[in-house]
Amino acid sequence: MTMARFFKFHALTDLEDECRRLGLALQFSADFAPLFQPVRVGPHVAGNTFCIQPMEGCDGTSDGQPDELTFRRYQRFGAGGAKLIWGEATAVADEARANPRQLLINEHTAPGLEKMLRVCREAHRTALGRDDDLVVGLQLTHSGRYSFQKPLIAVHDPILDQRIVIDKATGKTIDATYPPLDDDYLKHLVDHYVAAARLAHRIGYQFIDIKQCHRYLLSELLAARSRPGPYGGSLENRTRLARDIIVAIRSAVPGLTIATRINVYDCIPYRKQAGTNAGEPCPWTAPLECAWGTNPQNPLEPDLNEPLQWIVEMTRLGVACVNVSMGNPYASMHVIRPYEYPPPDGYETPEHPLCGVDRHVRLAEQMQRAVPRIPVVGSGYSYLQEFLVHAGAANVRDGRVAFVGAGRATLAQPDFVKQLMDHGKLDRKRICRTFSYCTALMRSKHNELGQYATGCPPFDKEVYGPLWEGAKGAT
């Protein structure tokens, strides 16, 4: 069954007309000057408002070090012109890695992570003449239920548990007998985060991100209403581990800036309708208590009461930058990344992708209005293709966000900011079309390394074209 395609916009006016038809409040501007204003991130100053989102390459070594494709990616990001580079998910413990090629931070991998940073900054200086206004950080993560060695769940989720296979031979999924992580394990994770933060600071990263998004461990804890004990139930308990991590890092590494990428809306998992590729919400009963930032009576609607409380508290604790995200890349992929074409294991979008972009913009604006003194990074722009800069310019101009975050678009055109600086527009021949090749590669596990590296086969053919051919032929 072939689904209708949505992106047919040859001019900005076409896009604006469609937004009006859909009743969306998306704004656009052809004045790009606001995008090139400096933004303060804690004690640092980024020279423009563009952020390279934490795009994992799944291209590290088996022991968690950056490899040649990792260095190549950060060289390209550094040369690309964005002044805030949000380094990708790096696990704080070996068992916390999401795939066998995810980066890991420890004494053994520190030299490689330092080289990754050095390559990035050197490329930036070469391309732009200076790097004193470049801000680079590293995202610290624990993958929780998505840890590849075995699922490490914080709380049972009756919908997501059914999707996590714990015995590949039998296809058995998590059931009620599968034990969540105990309180002692969670308590001692603080030490892992502090050790990782110390290393990141010693290496030279200017900030670290305490990752609280996409239903990885700290994100899952935010929704752990049914978990007993000190890490579940009340909002105070559900935020306890992240709070303890933030406080401990501020005390142990006072010169390091702390940021967080956080879900403000989990939504509900989706599935393919029987007999079609169309996406539909999974069955659920009210109240839905296992989703953060989500209306328990109608999980298709956000409820920002708790996310707003938590973000305000985090700024009080010293968090200096918030990167707003939402959804689950494994279960509600249209929410996190509005797309034209789903990945092979995905479903056709159940809404016009512009509605997803609009949701990102609206929710990020509410966060920025709540914490006007710190910068908020907005996400969800890549679907807009060449018009992402027009939306970003309007949003920065009007104070909806401080930074415009680009994710998939940077794999296709890592120099998109420099293109805008030099030519006043993006290179249409290398615009991300949200074909989801990058996600499909990330989902491909059947090679000798247990994980294909991910990138953009259509617009980075020399490197990722052969990998895509190999992934297509894998069984």
Image: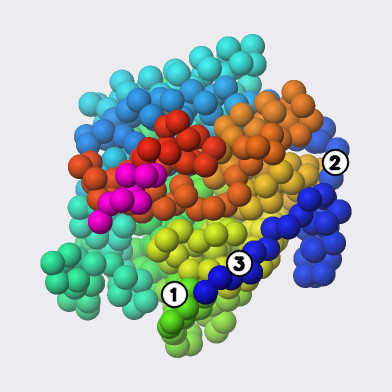
Where is residue 136? Give x, y as percent: 52, 29
Task: Residue at the far left: name it.
Answer: 169
Q: Which mark is residue 281?
A: none
Q: Secondary structure at mark 2?
A: loop
Tag nearer the camera, 2 or 3: 2
Depth order, front residue of 178/64? 64
> Nearer the N terminus, badge 2 or badge 1?
2
Q: Where 201 falls versus 434 (above or below)?
A: above
- At label 1, counting other C-alpha atoms closer than 10 Å, the crowd grade (few under 14, some 14-19, many 20 or more) is some
Q: Predominant secondary structure in magenta? A: helix
Q: Secondary structure at mark 3?
A: loop
Which kind of residue does numbered mark 2 sit on?
Answer: Ala
Verify CB contact (< 8 Å) between mark 2 and mark 1. no
Residue 303 in view = no
- How many angstroms separate mark 2 from mark 3 (CA)? 31 Å
Which kind of residue does numbered mark 3 sit on?
Answer: Leu
Where is residue 461? Give x, y as percent: 48, 35
Q: Locate residue 304 relative to residue 388 in the image: left or right.
A: left
The residue drawn where x is 64% and y is 53% is 383
Which kind of residue does numbered mark 1 sit on?
Answer: Arg
Query: Mark 2 — residue?
Result: 30
Asked if residue 471 is among those painted magenta in the image, a careful observer would answer: yes
Magenta segment range?
468-475
Query: Mark 3 — residue?
Result: 304
Query: Mark 1 — residue?
Result: 271
Depth order, front residue of 198/268? 268
The residue drawn where x is 76% and y is 34% is 425
Q: Quadrant of residue 30?
A: top right
Q: Where 318 falls versus 133 (above or below)?
A: below
Q: Locate residue 359 relative to residue 119 in the image: left or right.
A: right
